[in-house]
Image (cartoon, rainbow, N blue to C red):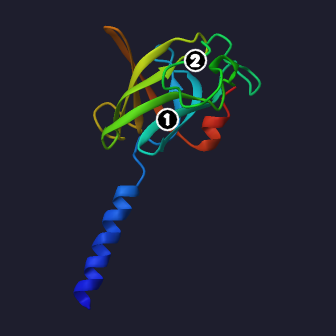
Amino acid sequence: MKKIAIFIYIILICAAVSFASDPAEGFWLSVDNRTGEVQSGWEIYQTNGVLYGKMLSAIGFTASDVARRCRASYQNFPIAGRVNELPILGTPWIFGLRRESSGRWSNGHVINPGDGSIYGCSIIFHPAGSGRFQHDALEMRGQLLLFSGSQFWRRATREEASSIR
């Protein structure tokens, strides 16, 4: 009986670990690399093993603003309908990322809803105290052809990510 209880306990631990959220998931504030100012609030979440990110709030945008400068469609965009008719806030502009390891996601895309540009995207979670990071950071790496660049986001609460104006 004791062996069965230990076996069930191990199975439950393994199941809990496999369903645990990734450290990249949660609420984040995008920070301008040059000025250090917060630009927008995001929710990063996982559905069926794919990572997505939707903008919750941003400087200069309201809930009624539409992504008019985007194209009507993008390959593999996660929402049906015309992209240039979707709201800027609440739409998953980050999509299609696949997990490499805990906190590392790649082969996705990010769309700039302000101008409609689409970039390859990868995300790397950096825990507080690792290297130059005093707080949890999310490295958002965008790629276009041979050019790439990173922006470092900082962890936030739902309230903080939803209140950028």
Answer yes or no: do the residues labelled 1 and 2 have beta carbons within 8 Å?
Answer: no
Task: Indicate whether 27 appears above or below 94.
Answer: below
Type of amino acid at the residue the image marks with label 1: Tyr
Residue 79 falls left or right of residue 105? right
Mark 1 and mark 2: Cα distance apart in space: 17 Å
Rendered location of residue 110, percent (x, y) = 48, 22
Element class at badge 1: strand
Q: State the image coordinates of residue 126 (x, y, percent, origin top left).
A: 34, 36
Residue that carries the numbered disc 2 in the rendered image: 73
Q: Is residue 155 above or below residue 68?
A: below
Q: Nearer the viewer, residue 90 or 163?
A: 90
Query: Within the image, what quadrant is residue 124 found in?
Result: top left
**Visible residue check, residue 125:** no
Q: Where's residue 69, x and y in %?
A: 64, 10
Q: Residue at x 35, y 70 (%)?
A: 12
In the rendered image, the vertical position of residue 100 relative to residue 115, given as above or below:
below
Identify the element where label 2 is drawn.
loop
Is 31 in front, or is 25? Answer: 25
Circle 1: is it few (<14), some (14-19), or many (20+) Cα within 10 Å? many
Q: Residue at x 49, y 35 (%)?
A: 52
Amino acid found under the numbered disc labelled 2: Ser
Write the residue at 44% across / 23% down.
Answer: 109
- At which x and y percent is residue 39? 58, 22
Q: The N terminus is located in which quarter? A: bottom left
- On residue 52, the disc is 1
- Whether residue 56 is visible, yes or no, is yes
Mark 2 closeness class: few <14, some 14–19, many ≥20 residues within 10 Å:
few
